Amino acid sequence: MSIDAYGIHLGPLYFRFYGIILMTGALAAAYLAQWMLNQKGKDRDLAWDALIWGLLFGVAGARVYHVLTPSVSSGVTTAYYLTHPLNIIDFSQGGLGIPGAVIGGVLGLWVFARRRKIDLSLLLDVAAPGLALAQAIGRWGNFVNQELYGPPTSLPWGIYIRPENRLSGFEDFTRFHPLFLYESLWNLVNAVFLFWLWRRHGDRLRQGDLFLVYLITYPVGRFLLEFIRLDFVPAFG
Protein backbone atom coordinates (compact mmCIF):
# COMPACT_ATOMS: atom_id res chain seq x y z
CA MET A 1 0.00 0.00 0.00
CA SER A 2 1.17 3.52 -0.79
CA ILE A 3 -0.36 6.96 -0.45
CA ASP A 4 0.15 9.96 -2.71
CA ALA A 5 -1.35 13.45 -2.77
CA TYR A 6 -4.55 12.29 -4.46
CA GLY A 7 -5.33 8.85 -3.13
CA ILE A 8 -4.37 5.42 -1.85
CA HIS A 9 -2.77 2.66 -3.92
CA LEU A 10 -3.83 -0.76 -2.68
CA GLY A 11 -2.37 -3.36 -5.00
CA PRO A 12 -3.94 -2.88 -8.43
CA LEU A 13 -6.65 -0.65 -6.93
CA TYR A 14 -6.50 3.10 -6.54
CA PHE A 15 -8.88 4.90 -4.20
CA ARG A 16 -8.97 8.64 -4.80
CA PHE A 17 -9.45 10.86 -1.76
CA TYR A 18 -11.95 12.86 -3.81
CA GLY A 19 -14.23 9.84 -4.17
CA ILE A 20 -13.80 8.86 -0.52
CA ILE A 21 -14.79 12.36 0.59
CA LEU A 22 -17.84 12.39 -1.68
CA MET A 23 -19.00 9.03 -0.33
CA THR A 24 -18.49 10.28 3.23
CA GLY A 25 -20.80 13.20 2.44
CA ALA A 26 -23.41 10.89 0.91
CA LEU A 27 -23.37 8.60 3.95
CA ALA A 28 -23.68 11.57 6.32
CA ALA A 29 -26.70 12.77 4.34
CA ALA A 30 -28.31 9.34 4.51
CA TYR A 31 -27.77 9.09 8.28
CA LEU A 32 -29.39 12.48 8.79
CA ALA A 33 -32.32 11.59 6.52
CA GLN A 34 -32.73 8.31 8.40
CA TRP A 35 -32.95 10.16 11.71
CA MET A 36 -35.46 12.66 10.32
CA LEU A 37 -37.65 9.88 8.93
CA ASN A 38 -37.57 8.13 12.29
CA GLN A 39 -38.63 11.36 14.01
CA LYS A 40 -41.60 11.59 11.64
CA GLY A 41 -42.62 8.01 12.41
CA LYS A 42 -41.69 6.81 8.92
CA ASP A 43 -39.66 3.81 7.84
CA ARG A 44 -36.10 5.00 8.38
CA ASP A 45 -34.69 2.38 6.01
CA LEU A 46 -36.21 4.40 3.18
CA ALA A 47 -33.18 6.67 3.47
CA TRP A 48 -30.75 3.90 2.51
CA ASP A 49 -32.92 2.51 -0.27
CA ALA A 50 -33.39 5.99 -1.70
CA LEU A 51 -29.66 6.72 -1.39
CA ILE A 52 -28.83 4.10 -4.02
CA TRP A 53 -31.21 5.65 -6.55
CA GLY A 54 -30.13 9.17 -5.68
CA LEU A 55 -26.45 8.32 -6.08
CA LEU A 56 -26.83 6.49 -9.38
CA PHE A 57 -28.87 9.23 -11.01
CA GLY A 58 -26.94 11.97 -9.21
CA VAL A 59 -23.55 10.83 -10.49
CA ALA A 60 -24.95 10.49 -14.00
CA GLY A 61 -26.47 13.97 -13.82
CA ALA A 62 -23.26 15.44 -12.42
CA ARG A 63 -21.26 13.95 -15.27
CA VAL A 64 -23.67 15.17 -17.94
CA TYR A 65 -23.53 18.66 -16.44
CA HIS A 66 -19.73 18.60 -16.57
CA VAL A 67 -19.74 17.41 -20.18
CA LEU A 68 -22.04 20.28 -21.16
CA THR A 69 -20.22 22.90 -19.04
CA PRO A 70 -16.59 21.81 -18.59
CA SER A 71 -14.38 24.11 -16.55
CA VAL A 72 -11.33 25.80 -18.03
CA SER A 73 -8.94 23.81 -15.83
CA SER A 74 -10.28 20.51 -17.16
CA GLY A 75 -8.58 21.30 -20.46
CA VAL A 76 -11.46 19.90 -22.51
CA THR A 77 -14.61 21.21 -24.17
CA THR A 78 -18.05 19.83 -24.92
CA ALA A 79 -16.94 19.42 -28.53
CA TYR A 80 -14.07 17.23 -27.32
CA TYR A 81 -16.46 14.91 -25.50
CA LEU A 82 -18.72 14.71 -28.53
CA THR A 83 -15.80 13.54 -30.65
CA HIS A 84 -14.44 11.25 -27.90
CA PRO A 85 -17.65 9.76 -26.43
CA LEU A 86 -15.87 7.03 -24.46
CA ASN A 87 -14.19 9.72 -22.35
CA ILE A 88 -17.62 10.75 -21.09
CA ILE A 89 -17.61 7.67 -18.85
CA ASP A 90 -13.96 8.09 -17.84
CA PHE A 91 -14.02 9.51 -14.31
CA SER A 92 -10.29 9.11 -13.70
CA GLN A 93 -9.67 12.83 -14.26
CA GLY A 94 -12.72 13.97 -12.33
CA GLY A 95 -15.43 16.12 -13.82
CA LEU A 96 -18.67 16.34 -11.82
CA GLY A 97 -21.08 19.27 -11.58
CA ILE A 98 -23.19 19.82 -8.45
CA PRO A 99 -26.21 21.33 -10.25
CA GLY A 100 -26.37 18.22 -12.42
CA ALA A 101 -26.01 16.03 -9.33
CA VAL A 102 -29.00 17.74 -7.70
CA ILE A 103 -31.14 17.41 -10.83
CA GLY A 104 -30.13 13.80 -11.34
CA GLY A 105 -30.61 12.99 -7.67
CA VAL A 106 -34.14 14.41 -7.69
CA LEU A 107 -34.92 12.35 -10.78
CA GLY A 108 -33.59 9.25 -9.03
CA LEU A 109 -35.74 9.92 -5.98
CA TRP A 110 -38.75 10.42 -8.25
CA VAL A 111 -38.19 7.00 -9.82
CA PHE A 112 -37.73 5.45 -6.37
CA ALA A 113 -40.88 7.14 -5.02
CA ARG A 114 -42.90 5.90 -8.00
CA ARG A 115 -41.68 2.35 -7.52
CA ARG A 116 -42.38 2.37 -3.79
CA LYS A 117 -45.61 4.39 -4.11
CA ILE A 118 -44.57 7.03 -1.59
CA ASP A 119 -44.74 10.81 -1.65
CA LEU A 120 -41.73 12.33 -3.42
CA SER A 121 -42.01 15.53 -1.38
CA LEU A 122 -41.42 13.54 1.82
CA LEU A 123 -38.12 12.24 0.46
CA LEU A 124 -37.06 15.65 -0.82
CA ASP A 125 -37.71 17.30 2.54
CA VAL A 126 -35.68 14.81 4.58
CA ALA A 127 -32.96 14.93 1.93
CA ALA A 128 -32.59 18.73 1.93
CA PRO A 129 -30.51 19.29 5.11
CA GLY A 130 -28.42 16.21 4.37
CA LEU A 131 -27.82 17.34 0.81
CA ALA A 132 -26.42 20.65 2.05
CA LEU A 133 -24.30 18.76 4.59
CA ALA A 134 -23.00 16.41 1.88
CA GLN A 135 -22.02 19.41 -0.23
CA ALA A 136 -20.19 20.95 2.73
CA ILE A 137 -18.18 17.75 3.15
CA GLY A 138 -17.75 17.09 -0.55
CA ARG A 139 -16.16 20.47 -1.25
CA TRP A 140 -13.08 19.29 0.63
CA GLY A 141 -12.50 16.96 -2.29
CA ASN A 142 -11.73 20.10 -4.28
CA PHE A 143 -9.07 20.95 -1.70
CA VAL A 144 -7.43 17.56 -2.23
CA ASN A 145 -7.53 18.04 -6.00
CA GLN A 146 -6.27 21.63 -5.66
CA GLU A 147 -9.15 23.09 -7.63
CA LEU A 148 -11.98 25.57 -7.09
CA TYR A 149 -9.85 28.40 -5.76
CA GLY A 150 -10.21 32.15 -6.08
CA PRO A 151 -7.85 35.01 -6.91
CA PRO A 152 -4.35 35.32 -5.44
CA THR A 153 -4.27 36.58 -1.86
CA SER A 154 -1.86 37.42 0.95
CA LEU A 155 -4.47 36.74 3.63
CA PRO A 156 -3.41 34.22 6.29
CA TRP A 157 -6.03 31.67 5.22
CA GLY A 158 -4.89 31.65 1.61
CA ILE A 159 -4.04 28.14 0.38
CA TYR A 160 -0.91 27.06 -1.46
CA ILE A 161 -1.55 25.74 -4.96
CA ARG A 162 1.11 23.57 -6.54
CA PRO A 163 2.56 24.96 -9.81
CA GLU A 164 1.02 22.20 -11.94
CA ASN A 165 -2.45 23.11 -10.66
CA ARG A 166 -2.26 26.86 -11.23
CA LEU A 167 -4.37 28.31 -14.00
CA SER A 168 -2.78 29.95 -17.00
CA GLY A 169 -1.79 33.52 -16.20
CA PHE A 170 -1.37 32.81 -12.48
CA GLU A 171 1.78 30.70 -12.58
CA ASP A 172 3.79 33.24 -10.57
CA PHE A 173 1.35 33.32 -7.65
CA THR A 174 1.47 30.78 -4.86
CA ARG A 175 -1.43 31.42 -2.49
CA PHE A 176 -5.08 31.81 -3.45
CA HIS A 177 -8.48 32.34 -1.87
CA PRO A 178 -9.87 28.95 -0.74
CA LEU A 179 -13.12 29.22 -2.67
CA PHE A 180 -13.90 25.59 -1.88
CA LEU A 181 -13.79 26.48 1.83
CA TYR A 182 -16.10 29.46 1.41
CA GLU A 183 -18.66 27.29 -0.35
CA SER A 184 -18.21 24.50 2.18
CA LEU A 185 -18.96 26.91 5.02
CA TRP A 186 -21.97 28.31 3.16
CA ASN A 187 -23.33 24.80 2.70
CA LEU A 188 -22.70 23.96 6.36
CA VAL A 189 -24.61 27.07 7.46
CA ASN A 190 -27.35 26.14 5.00
CA ALA A 191 -27.56 22.61 6.42
CA VAL A 192 -27.87 23.94 9.98
CA PHE A 193 -30.49 26.48 8.89
CA LEU A 194 -32.59 23.89 7.05
CA PHE A 195 -32.41 21.47 9.96
CA TRP A 196 -33.38 24.25 12.40
CA LEU A 197 -36.27 25.27 10.15
CA TRP A 198 -37.50 21.68 10.05
CA ARG A 199 -37.20 21.22 13.82
CA ARG A 200 -38.64 24.60 14.80
CA HIS A 201 -41.26 25.23 12.14
CA GLY A 202 -41.79 21.84 10.52
CA ASP A 203 -45.42 21.74 11.63
CA ARG A 204 -46.10 24.97 9.72
CA LEU A 205 -44.40 23.89 6.51
CA ARG A 206 -46.19 22.03 3.80
CA GLN A 207 -44.54 18.86 2.59
CA GLY A 208 -41.98 19.83 -0.03
CA ASP A 209 -41.44 23.36 1.30
CA LEU A 210 -38.12 22.54 2.96
CA PHE A 211 -36.60 21.38 -0.31
CA LEU A 212 -37.91 24.51 -2.02
CA VAL A 213 -36.10 26.59 0.60
CA TYR A 214 -32.91 24.68 -0.24
CA LEU A 215 -33.43 25.52 -3.91
CA ILE A 216 -33.36 29.19 -2.90
CA THR A 217 -30.60 29.29 -0.30
CA TYR A 218 -27.98 27.17 -2.05
CA PRO A 219 -28.04 29.00 -5.42
CA VAL A 220 -27.75 32.39 -3.66
CA GLY A 221 -24.41 31.44 -2.11
CA ARG A 222 -23.20 29.72 -5.26
CA PHE A 223 -24.08 32.74 -7.39
CA LEU A 224 -22.17 35.16 -5.17
CA LEU A 225 -19.08 32.95 -5.01
CA GLU A 226 -18.95 32.58 -8.78
CA PHE A 227 -17.81 36.22 -8.96
CA ILE A 228 -14.45 35.34 -7.40
CA ARG A 229 -13.97 32.01 -9.15
CA LEU A 230 -10.95 31.86 -11.44
CA ASP A 231 -11.90 28.55 -12.99
CA PHE A 232 -14.64 29.95 -15.22
CA VAL A 233 -17.30 27.47 -16.31
CA PRO A 234 -18.71 28.40 -19.73
CA ALA A 235 -22.23 27.37 -20.61
CA PHE A 236 -22.09 24.50 -23.09
CA GLY A 237 -18.34 24.96 -23.52
Image (spheres, helix red, strand yellow):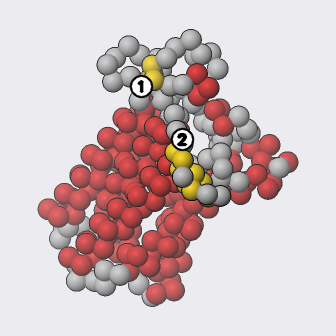
Q: Nearer the observer, disc 1 or disc 2?
A: 2
Instruction: Name above or below for residue 77 compared with residue 84.
Output: above
Image quadrant occupied by the C terminus: top right
Q: Secondary structure at mark 1?
A: strand
The image shows residue 149 at horizontal and vertical percentages of 48, 29
The image shows residue 102 at horizontal and vertical percentages of 49, 58
Query: Residue flagged by tag 1: what amino acid is it?
Result: Ile
Q: CA distance from mark 1 to mark 2?
A: 19 Å
82 to the left or right of 125? right
Q: Is residue 94 visible?
A: yes
Query: Residue flagged by tag 2: what amino acid is it?
Result: Asp
Q: Residue at x 25, y 72 (%)?
A: 35
Instruction: Tell me the residue that label 2 is attached to.
Output: 4
Name the mark on residue 89: none
Q: Quadrant of residue 12?
A: bottom right
The image shows residue 63 at horizontal and vertical percentages of 63, 54
